Image (spheres, grey):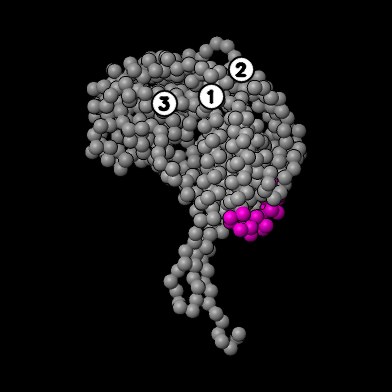
């Protein structure tokens, strides 16, 4: 599938060209071909999008919650009808395999449906006051929400924030990553039954994003992305005393305890490290394996890495696609080469392949240690960085030696160690004996530099609303 598209913002229900002349080419990471062109964005573009959202707010916020939810559910229904087309756009612009891309689109649809059901049930509280009075706590929308989302799972993350914001009565300015804007255009058009201005699409990079976040009429910022950008957003939001929910980077550890099957553990590690080419917020980026099973684990993990078929995401035989762009691939390769120069052992991968596209092979490093960028900094690539430890205590200690705290995984047959792990690991999410998965409805707050607030689940509805206390009593009889 190939498209070449020059597109515009969607503001107030209309296609609106940028006020600026600068643009950004959108490329296919599998071959480097240009597939589209978007405006870079300007402050004036952001002003127009926020003004449209502000103008639509009174009508939208006063609409019955069930009607708002019905419109969000209708958007999900439309998106389901175009799921294949949207997933192919995701593969085209960021490289993930078509099955993985379709899974992300379906997750986004499911999230919209979830919030359409939960929104009307988002209850306040009735308080026990005087007999002749009514006292309550009620939820109200913040107002205009800026939704700023990343490129690695562009549809699922956007749908979560947009769905929660809309069903609670907020209006939205949706700013996707400049690396994956074309799928965002498709997502936005699925909401064409909304009143004009309720959902606006602002394209571009920081030239659009910075004035959007800083705008005095933006009341709420919902952001997923890197730590540096998250810190900048929090600084701006803090200065203006506006609410911000941010999910940022991670350097997620996996502990492989003694007594587990090395082959099974290697399979879990391979999934955690190499799924979506390691470009998942909760990818496994550090592995601490007990010395008793380390040799067999490394052998199995290396074999799985070497067996993975890397190729164009549209190739049905591909199990892993490219890195999103050359800049990200360069960072990944720098982490690997610096680790090897510092004494790590390269067991497989670690070389930039010849030919077009920003591909990088699944890579296994042994003998890594703190002080190496591949251990200390977010790599966001298909790298399994393994350190051998002598005990579970040592593994826990090393797993916590990070500025991040997004998630962690532990593979152990020991119930006591499992209990210690989820209590002692300083991470928002801890998974025992499974690298991914979990029950629907769960929500976590990241630890340390990995973010602030609930970014998903039913609790997100609390984040996107304010709470007002109401005391209502009758006037004195003589004033009736």
Q: Depth check: give the residue in front, 424 or 29.
A: 29
Q: Depth check: give the residue in front, 361 or 86.
A: 86
The Cα–Cα distance between marks 1 and 2, rounded to whole angstroms, is: 14 Å
Q: Answer with left or right where residue 319 lies relative to residue 51.
A: left
Q: Position of residue 3 (x, y in %)?
A: 69, 24
Residue bearing the label numbered 1: 97
Point 72% across, 45% down: residue: 13
Residue bearing the label numbered 3: 271
Q: Position of residue 200 (x, y in %)?
A: 67, 44
Disc 2 element: loop
The Cα–Cα distance between marks 1 and 3, rounded to whole angstroms, is: 14 Å
Point 60% across, 50% down: residue: 70
Point 53% across, 24% down: residue: 97
Look at the image and give the residue range highlighted in magenta: 48-67
The answer to whether residue 299 is magenta is no
- In the rendered structure, are the residues bearing label 1 and label 2 in contact, judged by CB atoms less than 8 Å apart? no
Q: Depth check: give the residue in front, 245 or 114.
A: 114
> Which comes before the other along the chain, label 2 or label 3?
2
Q: Answer with left or right where residue 433 lies relative to residue 7.
A: left
- Eye-nearest disc, 1 or 2: 1
Q: Quarter of the image holding residue 260?
A: top left
The Cα–Cα distance between marks 2 and 3, rounded to whole angstroms, is: 25 Å
Q: Main secondary structure of the magenta part?
A: helix
Of the 4 image quadrants, the one containing the N terminus is top right
Q: Position of residue 163 (x, y in %)?
A: 57, 46
Disc 1 element: loop
Q: Answer with left or right where residue 331 lies relative to residue 261.
A: right
> Which comes before the other along the chain, label 1 or label 3?
1
């Amino acid at each position: 599938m190939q498209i070449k598209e020059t597109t515009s913002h969607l503001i107030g229900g209309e296609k609106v060209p940028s006020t600026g002349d600068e643009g950004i080419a959108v490329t296919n990471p599998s071959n480097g071909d240009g597939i589209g062109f978007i405006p870079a964005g300007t402050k004036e573009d952001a002003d127009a999008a926020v003004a449209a959202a502000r103008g639509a707010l009174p009508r939208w916020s006063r609409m019955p919650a069930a009607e708002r939810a019905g419109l969000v559910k209708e958007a999900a229904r439309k998106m389901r009808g175009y799921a294949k087309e949207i997933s192919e756009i995701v593969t085209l612009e960021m490289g993930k395999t078509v099955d993985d891309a379709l899974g992300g689109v379906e997750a986004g649809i499911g999230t919209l449906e979830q919030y359409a059901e939960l929104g009307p049930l988002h209850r306040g509280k009735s308080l026990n006051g005087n007999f002749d009075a009514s006292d309550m706590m009620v939820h109200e929308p913040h107002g205009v929400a800026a939704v700023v989302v990343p490129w690695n799972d562009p549809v699922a993350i956007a749908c979560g924030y947009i769905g929660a914001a809309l069903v609670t009565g907020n209006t939205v300015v949706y700013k996707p990553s400049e690396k994956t804007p074309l799928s965002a255009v498709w997502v936005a058009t699925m909401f064409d039954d909304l009143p004009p201005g309720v959902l606006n699409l602002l394209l571009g990079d920081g030239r659009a994003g910075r004035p959007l976040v800083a705008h005095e009429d933006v009341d709420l910022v919902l952001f997923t992305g890197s730590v540096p950008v998250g810190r900048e957003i929090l600084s701006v939001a803090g200065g203006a005393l506006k609410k911000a929910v941010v999910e940022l980077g991670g350097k997620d550890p996996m502990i492989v305890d003694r007594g587990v099957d090395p082959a099974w553990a290697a399979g879990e590690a391979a999934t955690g490290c190499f799924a979506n080419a390691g470009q998942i917020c909760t990818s496994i980026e550090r592995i601490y394996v007990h010395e008793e099973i380390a040799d067999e684990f490394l052998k199995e993990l290396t074999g799985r890495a070497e067996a993975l078929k890397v190729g164009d995401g549209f190739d049905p035989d591909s199990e892993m696609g490219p890195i999103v762009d050359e800049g990200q691939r360069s960072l990944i390769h720098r982490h690997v080469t610096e680790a090897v120069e510092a004494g790590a052992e390269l067991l497989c991968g670690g070389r930039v392949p010849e030919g077009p596209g920003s591909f990088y092979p699944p890579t296994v490093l042994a003998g890594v240690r703190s002080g190496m960028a591949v251990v200390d900094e977010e790599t966001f690539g298909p790298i399994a960085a393994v350190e051998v430890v002598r005990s579970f205590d040592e593994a826990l200690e090393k797993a916590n030696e990070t500025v991040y705290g997004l998630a962690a995984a532990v593979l152990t047959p020991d119930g006591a160690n499992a209990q210690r792990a989820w209590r002692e690991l300083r991470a928002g999410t801890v998974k025992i004996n499974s690298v991914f998965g979990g029950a629907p409805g769960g929500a976590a707050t990241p630890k340390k530099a990995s973010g602030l607030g609930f970014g998903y689940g039913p609790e997100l509805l609390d984040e996107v609303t304010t709470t007002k206390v109401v005391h209502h009593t009758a006037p004195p009889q003589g004033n009736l």
